[in-house]
Amino acid sequence: MQTRIGLLLSLLAVPSLAQVAGEEDVRKSLAAQKERAGVVAERGEKPHYTRKFDLSGLHHYVPQNQLSG
């Protein structure tokens, strides 16, 4: 009886294959999130629309009606 209890306790102390696989999935998921965040940050720093417009010839905007409410 003592041997069975000892064996059971030792089996509970060893991580199961599902736990090890789950930890690996978590590690891979976090690595993918970190890589994606880096790509998004890198893209965000680059100018995507470089064409400039000269708006000096436009008239100053003056609203016709004042809205309320």
Image (cartoon, helix red, strand yellow):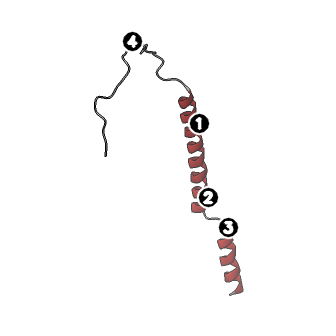
> What label sits on residue 38 in the rendered view?
1
Left or right of 53? Residue 20 is: right
Residue nearest the observer in this picture, 49 or 14? 49
Residue that mark 4 sits on: 57
Q: Residues within 10 Å of mark 1 (few under 14, many from 20)?
A: few
Sequence-wise, the earlier of marks 1 and 2 is 2
Which mark sits nearer the N-terminus, 2 or 4?
2
Viewer-nearest of labels 2 and 4? 4
Q: Mark 3 and mark 2 in contact (Cβ < 8 Å)? A: no
In-front residue for pair 25/16:
25
Give, as a three-letter code, the residue at label 1. Answer: Gly
Pick whichever of labels 2 and 3 is earlier in the sequence: 3
Under circle 4, the secondary element is loop
User: Which of 65/26 is in front?
Assistant: 65
Amino acid at dot 2: Val
Secondary structure under the numbered disc 3 in the rendered image: loop
Report the residue marked by disc 3.
Answer: 14
Q: Please tell me how crowded label 3 is: few (under 14), some (14-19), or many (20+) other residues with Cα within 10 Å.
A: few
Which circle's residue, 3 or 4, is located before the other in the chain?
3
Q: Which residue lies under the disc numbered 2? A: 20
